[in-house]
Amino acid sequence: MQRKSKSSSGELLIGIHAVSSALQQLPSQLIEIQIAQGSQSSRLQEISDQARSEAVNLSFVSRDKLDKLTDGGRHQDVVAWFEALNIYTEKQLEQVLDATGENPLVLILDGVQDPHNLGACLRTAEAAGVAAVIYPKDKSASITPVTRRAAAGAAEVMPIIEVTNLARVLRQLKQRGIWLAATNDQADADIYQVDLTGGLGLVMGNEGKGIRRLTEELCDFAFNIPMAGSVSSLNVSVATGICLFEALRQRASST
């Protein structure tokens, strides 16, 4: 028996990768999948076959309908509605951290505003084994279909905590013994000279203004990413990837 269609609720997933990832990892949270009529894609046939085997509601609609649903976006002939159970509020912070085990690696995004950058950070965080991603509700990108597509499946499985008071949350992390590290071009030490093992919250800032003053004051230490070329700064998602994988390298070497 297929689940009842509830396409008016849930969050929209767009594109083959996002839908396929959710279908493979969390089929019970898929509400409905819609595929463009007449599509000949073998990957869409795989999605269709798996949706039937998982009893996920499946329908075939006009491509025009998918265009309207996605505001003309590149939907690749498939969308889905997804019940997101991995997005938490500040009140659930302790619950999420309790489930992460000892010495978690947490990514904190202080005002990343581009949904593509947020999605790319989520994708990298999931690949690097980050326990949770935290970002403020105000003046920040949120989890939208654009974010989910850029995250390529990570936004469906990564614990995400959207908070109203980032400074308060940072203090909570410190009380749990989690050290906070910030990137700063003016820091004396570079990323290869600091200790990124143990319980760690990596703080990354806004695309233009960087980390806010109060956020930086709450961090325990800062480091820079050494630059060998003439470019003075990196995209936040690129910088996040460098930092997370250096932390991953150090943590693997310390065990």
Image (cartoon, helix red, strand yellow):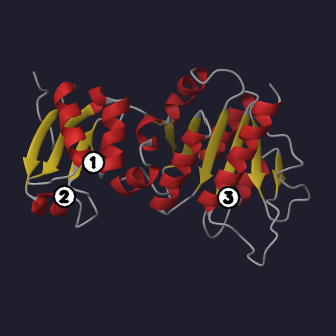
* Residue 250 drawn above or below residue 40: above
**Left or right of residue 188, residue 152 in this image:** left
Q: Residues within 10 Å of mark 2 (few under 14, many from 20)?
A: some
- Three-letter amino acid code at disc 2? Leu
- Which one is earlier in the sequence, the residue at label 2 or at label 3? 2
* Residue 52 drawn above or below residue 33: above
Classify mark 1: helix, strand or loop. Answer: strand
Whether residues under marks 1 and 2 lie with C-beta atoms below 8 angstroms apart, the answer is yes
- Identity of the residue drawn at 67% across and 58% down: 239
Nearest the eye: 44 or 113: 44
Q: Residues within 10 Å of mark 3 (few under 14, many from 20)?
A: some
Mark count: 3
- Three-letter amino acid code at disc 1? Leu
Query: Which residue position holds label 2?
Result: 69
User: Label for residue 155?
Assistant: none
User: Label for residue 12?
Assistant: 1
- Which one is earlier in the sequence, the residue at label 3 or at label 1? 1
Query: Which residue position holds label 3?
Result: 239
In this orientation, does residue 197 appear?
Answer: no
Query: Can you give x and y, in whole percent of width and height, for residue 160 in the image?
Result: 49, 39
Quadrant of the snapshot with the C terminus: top right
Nearest the eye: 153 or 105: 153
Query: Can you give x and y, in whole percent of width and height, for residue 118 in the image?
Result: 51, 55
Query: Can you give x and y, in whole percent of width and height, for residue 236 in the image?
Result: 62, 61
Whether residues under marks 3 and 1 lie with C-beta atoms below 8 angstroms apart, the answer is no
Quadrant of the snapshot with the N terminus: top left
In this orientation, does residue 180 appear?
Answer: yes
